[in-house]
């Protein structure tokens, strides 16, 4: 039988040692790394978003997830009515609000866009 199988391969393998805590350190380190890299920051952002939506009130200046800047005119449980220009309103879902802007942003942007529109209409005349 030694003709087909070498004597070294036919010998019994030594008993495998049991992996102790050293064998678990690397997988645990990976789990801790992913927790601090992905899970914890996402949970923190989610908590901040919920607090911002809860603090939403009439007169706040916001930007939607679609990039629309507006001033809050009405707040409902599910929807928010935004004024995006003088006497021009839209309704968006409350969860579509991405950020709150500093006071005065809406007024400054509207003033700037209105002055651009009036200068363009004067130049065409």
Image: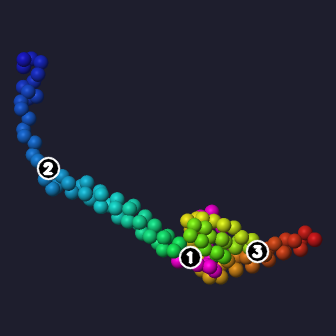
The percent coordinates of residue 98 (x first, y second) are 56, 68
Question: Which is the main secondary structure of the residues drawn in magenta?
Answer: loop
Q: Is residue 40 visible?
A: yes
Q: Secondary structure at mark 2?
A: loop
Quarter location, residue 110: bottom right
| Magenta-highlighted residues | 55-70
User: In which quadrant is the N terminus drawn?
Assistant: top left
Q: Which residue is mark 3?
A: 87
Quarter location, residue 81: bottom right
Magenta-span inclusion, residue 96: no
- Return the residue nearer the eye: 100 or 59: 59
Q: How is the image coloured?
A: rainbow
Mark closer to the chain start, 1 or 2? 2
In the picture shown, does residue 96 fall above or below 2? below
Q: Which residue is mark 2?
A: 19
In the picture shown, does residue 20 fall above or below 51? above
Q: Which mark is residue 56?
A: 1
Labelled pair 1, 2 in contact (Cβ < 8 Å): no
Nearest-to-viewer mark from 2 and 3: 3
Mark closer to the chain start, 1 or 3? 1
The percent coordinates of residue 36 (x first, y second) are 35, 64
User: In which quadrant is the C terminus drawn?
Assistant: bottom right
In screen coordinates, is 78 left or right of 37? right
């Amino acid at each position: 039988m030694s003709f087909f199988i070498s004597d070294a391969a036919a010998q019994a393998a030594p008993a495998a040692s049991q992996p102790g805590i050293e064998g678990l350190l690397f997988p645990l380190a990976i789990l801790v790394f992913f927790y601090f890299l992905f899970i914890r920051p996402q949970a923190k952002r989610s908590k901040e978003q919920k607090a911002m939506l809860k603090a939403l009130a009439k007169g706040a200046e916001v930007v939607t997830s679609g990039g629309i800047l507006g001033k809050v005119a009405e707040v409902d449980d599910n929807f928010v009515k935004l004024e995006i220009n003088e006497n021009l309103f839209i309704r968006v879902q409350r969860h579509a609000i991405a950020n709150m802007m500093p006071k005065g942003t809406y007024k400054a942007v509207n003033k700037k866009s209105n002055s651009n529109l009036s200068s363009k209409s004067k130049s065409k005349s």
